[in-house]
Amino acid sequence: MNKGSNYIEDISQIRNIMERSSRFMSLSGVSGILAGVYALIGAYIAYKIFYFSDELIYKSISESMLSSNVFKLIILACVILILAIGTAIWFSYLKAKKNNHKIWDATARRMVVNLFIPLVTGGIFILILFSKGVIGLIAPVTLIFYGLALINASKYTYTDIRYLGFCEIALGLASSYFIGYGLVFWAIGFGVMHIVYGSIMYFKYEK
């Protein structure tokens, strides 16, 4: 009976070692929660600065009012992005250090590359939309390409991220139909969904 138990334990350990070598397991649920909080704060500030509506889809960005507001939103988005990325790196470092894992190895590099391919593509597409004045579709596009990036990167980290990616894509498609509510969908996708996902990850893998 003892031998059987030892074999099962050995197989489990081998499986864990193989999983750690092929997947980046240092993502932190806390960083996901904080990223969601940053997004909700940013969405509230963006609402105070400016709110998108249907009439803006075909307006030229050369109008001074629109340019001024969009510039403020770009600065706000960059600040939120830097905070979210910085928080993710810091908490991933702490988790990796706690578990004696390397934070930057071949698996982490593959995950980052697969994450950034859709993100960079989406970023270029957003710049094209911005240059054409199609402001109303920017929020849906960010959700859709972010969801694609998560699904693409999920092969190299927790598979739970894939489900978050599907939710982001669904929200992005819904947002592209209800153009006037883009900021609401954005807040749900990057704010609420991140908080829910981060909480699940924390209680499932870190508690």
Image: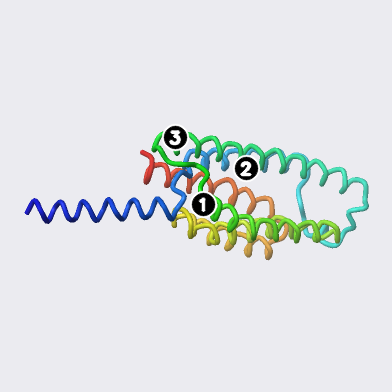
- Amino acid of disc 3: Lys
Compared across the picture, whether 100 is left or right of 171 comes to left
Q: Position of residue 173 (x, y in %)?
A: 63, 65
Question: Marks 2 and 3, how far apart in space?
Answer: 27 Å
Question: Marks 1 and 3, how far apart in space?
Answer: 17 Å
The circle drawn on residue 39 is 2
Q: Which quadrant of the rendered structure holds the C terminus?
A: top left
What is the count of numbered marks?
3
- Amino acid of disc 1: Ala
Q: Which quadrant of the rendered structure holds the N terminus?
A: bottom left
Q: Tag 2: Cα neighbours inside 10 Å, few (<14), some, or many (≥20)?
A: many
- Which residue is drawn at the image coordinates 81% and 60% (left, top)? 128
Q: SS of the residue at dot 2?
A: helix
* Location of mark 3 (residue): 97
Question: Marks 2 and 1, how far apart in space?
Answer: 30 Å
Label pair 1/3, CB-CB below 8 angstroms: no
* Location of mark 1 (residue): 106
Query: Residue 160 falls in which quadrant of the image?
Result: bottom left
Q: Is residue 171 above or below residue 99?
A: below
- Amino acid of disc 2: Ala
